Image (tube, grey):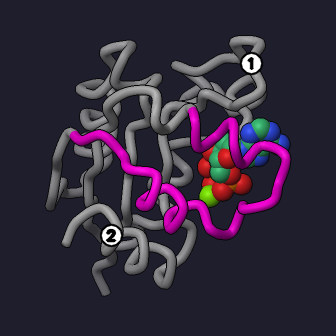
Amino acid sequence: MSERTLVLIKPDGVARGLTGEILRRIEAKGYVIAELKKTTATAEQLAAHYAEHEGKPFYQPLVDFMLSGPIVAAVAEGEGVIPGFRSLAGQTDPTTAAPGTIRGDLGRDWGEKVQKNLVHGSDSIESAEREIGIWFN
Ligand code: DAT
Ligand code: MG
C-alpha cells in the first residue's frame, strides 16, 4: 500500500540553495511530491514535531536552529517511501552519512552544537501521519 512521509528541508538546506537538489533526488527515486510549501516554523509546531526529543541536550539548539530561517515542508508519496526517504537522507550525523545520500553528499559538521543535516524524514507510519498534521492542515 502506498505510504506518505513528511519531509522537511531544514534552514541550512534552504539557505544553501539545495531545495531543488533535494526534491530532485526524491522525484528521481520515483516518489511523488504530493504537497509542498515554503514556510517559517513556529515554536508550537516544533514543540509538537520534536516532542520525543524534549529534555535531550540537543533539543534547544535543534529548536533554535529550526527557527533560524525558512524551511520547506513536503509530503512525499509512494510504496515504501518512509524507509525509502530515510535511506535517501542517510544517517543522522552528516560527517559519517554514506556518500550517495543527501546528508553524506551535501552535509558536513560546521562545528556547532547542532547537527545541520539538511533534512527531516518521518520514521514510521504513525509519526508520518502525526507530523503531516503539524505542517499541513
Ligand atoms: P533523524 O533526523 O535522523 O531522525 P533524530 O530523530 O534522532 O534523527 O534526531 C532529530 C534531530 O536532532 C537530528 O536530525 C539532528 C538532531 N540530533 C539528533 N541527535 C543529535 C546529537 N547527538 N547531537 C546533536 N544533534 C542531534
Ligand atoms: Mg527522527
**Residue 35 higher or lower than 137, as above or below:** above
Residue type at mark 2?
Answer: Ile
Residue type at mark 1?
Answer: Glu
Question: Would residue 91 be visible to someone looking at this image?
Answer: no
In terms of depth relative to the viewer, which is nearer, 54 or 2? 54
**Seen in the image, is 52 located left or right of residue 73?**
right
Residue located 28% across and 68% down the image:
78
Give the residues drawn in magenta, as a range. Answer: 39-64
Q: Quadrant of the C terminus?
A: bottom left
Residue located 25% across and 33% down the image:
24
In terms of depth relative to the viewer, which is nearer, 46 or 80? 46
**Seen in the image, is 65 located left or right of residue 10?**
right
**Seen in the image, is 7 located left or right of residue 47?**
left
Q: Quadrant of residue 53?
A: bottom right
**Residue 17 higher or lower than 4, as above or below:** above
Q: In this figure, which residue is indicated by the disc labeled 1?
A: 112
Residue located 17% across and 46% down the image:
37
Residue most extreme to the front: 43
The circle drawn on residue 17 is none
Measured from the top left, where is residue 5 in percent x and y? 37, 66
The circle drawn on residue 132 is 2
